[in-house]
């Protein structure tokens, strides 16, 4: 795969796609550069400057009922660009839709005003090749059902191979609007949270290629905004793993994570506070508790400077951690187009 060398793209590119598109192709993008200053659990200094992320998105309304979406991503540590999303959506009728392709499956929302990803995202986010059918409107109820193959497989069916789309999930929510106030509440179910990106990375690194049984997961969220105020509450939990798969304190882990965040937006930017906590995620490398304070300032159009202070508390030594804390101060310059 070729590495990305330069970026020089306009906000909107109209291409001669008359053979298949009714509307112009829209290209969007994001670039983030981070400077980090802090200390780890061993009290060692951790200072670095990184190209955190590059995103290139391509969207086209093929016709009045068909849309296409592609997202290319480069993150620190990667050698090139990956296709993290690539799907086609069909507008069926009266709010109903069908989407097929690679997507972030609708399990958890993982919204935040911070630079750091939420611990709920670290536990639950999953990029999969999936088929989804759902309903969505301007407000009121929404929801969907989806199926995908995934990378894990039950030991009892290991001899049959893993080319079976037997993983599934569902989400349901309600969006209420009144004047400046909006409230979104919802619940999600996944038949196998072991296929979440970071969980599967840990399992595969430990040569766990099969599971005694699939590990179901549940996610709950509430997102509130009213004028300059906003709040996010999210909780993600998984069923119990076997000790040989993912352990905690000598037993099978039941990992969970929660995020509580509040923010106030000024004309110049946003101030946000967040408290996050986990349970039985030590094997996944997540802290037991995290406190964050973040400030963002709009420097110019589509140009933002963010500053974040994060303090992590590791699990105790009896739970397999160090019992220490770590801290990090991050400055991020980001642009979107």
Image (cartoon, grey):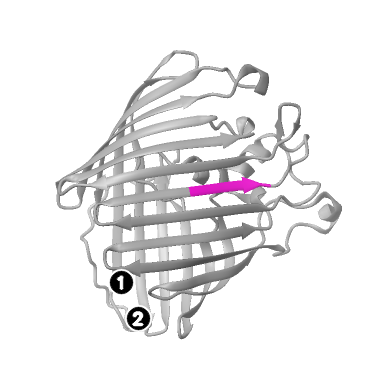
The residue furthest top is 43
Give the spatial CA distance, label 2 vs label 1.
8 Å
Main secondary structure of the magenta stretch: strand
Is residue 138 part of the magenta span, yes or no? Answer: no
Residue 5 visible at all: no
The picture quadrant where one finds residue 292 is top left
Residue 292 higher or lower than 184, as above or below: above
Residue 34 x %, y %: 31, 34
Q: Residue at x 55, y 57 (%)?
A: 107
Q: Residue at x 60, y 41 (%)?
A: 256
Reading the image, the residue beneath label 1 is: 25
* Relative to 80, 248 lies left or right: right
Reading the image, the residue beneath label 2 is: 21
Instruction: Specify start and end residues of the magenta stretch as a single range.
Output: 234-238
The picture quadrant where one finds residue 283 is top right
Q: For this rendering, which residue is in front, 186 or 196?
A: 186
Q: Residue at x 37, y 84 (%)?
A: 63
Residue 102 higher or lower than 54, as above or below: below
* Relative to 117, 236 lies left or right: right
Residue 223 higher or lower than 112, as above or below: below
* Relative to 212, 95 lies left or right: left
Residue 241 x %, y %: 74, 41
Give the total number of marks visible in the rendering.
Answer: 2
Residue 244 visible at all: yes
Q: Residues within 10 Å of mark 1 (few under 14, many from 20)?
A: many
Q: Are marks 2 and 1 in contact (CB under 8 Å)?
A: yes
* Relative to 206, 4 lies left or right: left
Residue 126 x %, y %: 56, 53
Residue 26 higher or lower than 265, as above or below: below
User: Judging from the image, what secondary structure is the residue with disc 2 in?
Assistant: loop
Residue 86 x %, y %: 47, 64
């Amino acid at each position: 795969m070729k590495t990305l060398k330069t970026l020089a793209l306009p906000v909107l590119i109209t291409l001669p796609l008359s053979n298949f598109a009714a509307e112009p192709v829209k290209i969007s993008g994001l670039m983030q550069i981070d400077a980090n200053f802090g200390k780890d659990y061993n009290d060692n200094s951790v200072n670095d400057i990184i190209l955190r992320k590059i995103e290139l998105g391509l969207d086209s309304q093929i016709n009045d009922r068909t849309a296409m979406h592609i997202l290319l991503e480069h993150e620190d540590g990667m050698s090139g660009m990956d296709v993290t999303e690539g799907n086609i959506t069909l507008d069926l009728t009266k709010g109903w839709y069908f989407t097929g392709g690679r997507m972030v499956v609708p399990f958890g929302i993982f919204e935040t005003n911070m630079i750091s990803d939420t611990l709920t995202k670290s536990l639950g986010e999953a990029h999969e090749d999936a088929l989804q059918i759902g309903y969505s409107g301007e407000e009121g109820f929404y929801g969907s059902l989806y199926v995908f193959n995934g990378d894990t497989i039950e030991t009892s069916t290991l001899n049959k191979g893993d080319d079976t789309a037997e993983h599934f999930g569902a989400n349901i929510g309600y969006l209420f609007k009144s004047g400046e106030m909006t409230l979104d509440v919802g619940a999600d179910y996944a038949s196998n949270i072991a296929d979440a990106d970071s969980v599967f990375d840990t399992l595969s690194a430990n040569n766990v290629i099969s599971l005694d049984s699939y590990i179901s997961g549940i996610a709950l969220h509430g997102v509130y905004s009213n004028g300059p105020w906003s709040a996010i509450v999210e909780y993600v939990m998984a069923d119990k793993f076997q000790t040989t798969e993912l352990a905690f304190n000598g037993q099978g882990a039941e990992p969970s994570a929660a995020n509580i965040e509040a923010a106030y937006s000024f004309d110049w930017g946003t101030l946000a506070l967040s408290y996050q906590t986990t349970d039985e995620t030590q094997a996944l490398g997540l802290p037991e508790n995290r406190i964050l304070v973040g400030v963002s300032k709009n420097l110019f159009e589509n140009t933002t400077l963010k500053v974040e202070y994060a303090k992590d508390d590791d699990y105790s030594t009896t739970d397999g951690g160090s019992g220490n804390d770590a801290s990090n101060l991050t400055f991020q310059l980001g642009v979107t187009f």
